[in-house]
Image (cartoon, rainbow, N blue to C red):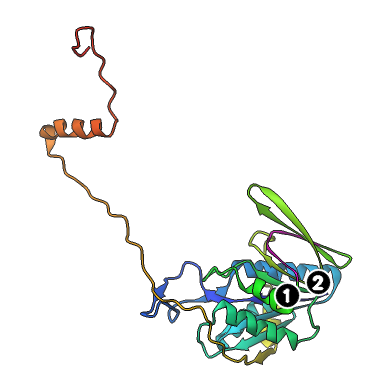
């Protein structure tokens, strides 16, 4: 089975995120990696091909440096890398999905029997590209998948939902977005790294498509304000402390006698 996995170059988790005046992420001082969901998607594709035969193609849209992330996936066992090379401008989900769909139409086999995506990108969390690509190609799509079985041209995909489980059965070809936890990705071996370093990356240049969705304004929520109040010093602060504790309901209620005096 020939499987296509779409991955995204994202800033390293835990790195410092700096926003520009236009509201975009300044990535000049960030390391880069592949979204964890997509790394699991590559692992799942490699496992399927190890069991059933076939090839795994990884595809990404990004600047020339994104070839490094493709090589990371080749080191995990993928067979071919395709870079939809951009000039570094940020592509929105609509433009990204359109570029991927156009590229897939020109690749072999068309369509791929199975296309994997991460459930959402680690940086934007848009949850959109897989669904948009499936719609553009006229393919069924299931999302949020954490269990997967293939049998007789049918994919049986399961996901967790409100404490229970949902199971979908769709005929191939199909688009599946997987979540982190569907498997435990392997560490790349030394032979895998050497092979990935020598591998040739297929480069294509998609036509720039301005995304109709625009960020009009970015507001940073105010941090909760905390205030410390000094009640006094030494023994003189005890009455004020008792008053505050009483207001907070932290003092036991005083019992009164029959004549109304405190007992």
Residue nearest the observer in this picture, 12 or 226: 226
Which residue is found at the position 73% from the left and 79% from the top? 137
User: Residue 205 location in percent, x, y?
Assistant: 62, 92
CB within 8 Å, label 1 to label 2: yes
As for residue 202 lying within the magenta part, the answer is no
Identify the element where label 2 is drawn.
Answer: helix
Q: SS class of the residue under badge 1?
A: loop
Q: Which residue is mark 1?
A: 77
Q: Nearer the viewer, residue 144 or 216?
A: 216
Q: Quadrant of residue 141?
A: bottom right
Query: Quick one: which residue is furthest to the top in this view?
Result: 258
- Where are the magenta residues, as a range? 140-149
Which residue bears the numbered disc 2? 49
Asked if residue 80 is positioned above or below residue 141 in the image, the reply reads: below
Q: Position of residue 5 (x, y in %)?
A: 70, 75
Asked if residue 224 lies left or right of residue 204, the reply is: left
174 sits to left or right of 194? right
């Amino acid at each position: 089975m020939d499987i296509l996995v779409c991955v995204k170059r994202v800033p390293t988790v835990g790195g410092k995120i700096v926003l520009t005046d236009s509201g975009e992420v300044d990535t000049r001082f960030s390391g880069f990696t592949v979204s964890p969901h997509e790394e699991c998607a590559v692992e799942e594709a490699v496992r399927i091909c190890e069991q059933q035969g076939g090839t795994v193609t990884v595809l990404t849209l990004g600047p020339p440096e994104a070839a490094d992330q493709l090589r990371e996936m080749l080191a995990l066992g993928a067979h071919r890398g395709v870079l939809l090379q951009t000039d570094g401008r940020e592509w929105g989900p609509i433009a990204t999905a359109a570029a991927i769909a156009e590229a897939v139409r020109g690749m072999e086999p068309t369509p791929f029997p199975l296309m994997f995506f991460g459930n959402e990108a680690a940086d934007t969390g848009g949850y959109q590209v897989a669904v948009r690509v499936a719609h553009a190609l006229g393919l069924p799509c299931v999302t949020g998948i954490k269990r997967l079985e293939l049998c007789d041209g049918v994919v049986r995909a399961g996901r967790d939902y409100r404490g229970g489980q949902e199971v979908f059965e769709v005929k191939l070809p199909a688009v599946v977005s997987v979540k982190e936890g569907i498997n435990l990705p392997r560490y790349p071996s030394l032979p895998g790294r050497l092979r990935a370093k020598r591998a040739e990356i297929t480069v294509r240049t998609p036509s720039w498509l301005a995304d109709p969705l625009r960020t009009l304004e970015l507001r940073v929520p105010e941090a909760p304000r905390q205030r410390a109040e000094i009640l006094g010093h030494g023994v003189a602060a005890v009455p004020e402390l008792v008053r505050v504790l009483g207001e907070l309901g932290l003092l036991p209620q005083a019992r009164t006698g029959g004549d109304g005096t405190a007992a």
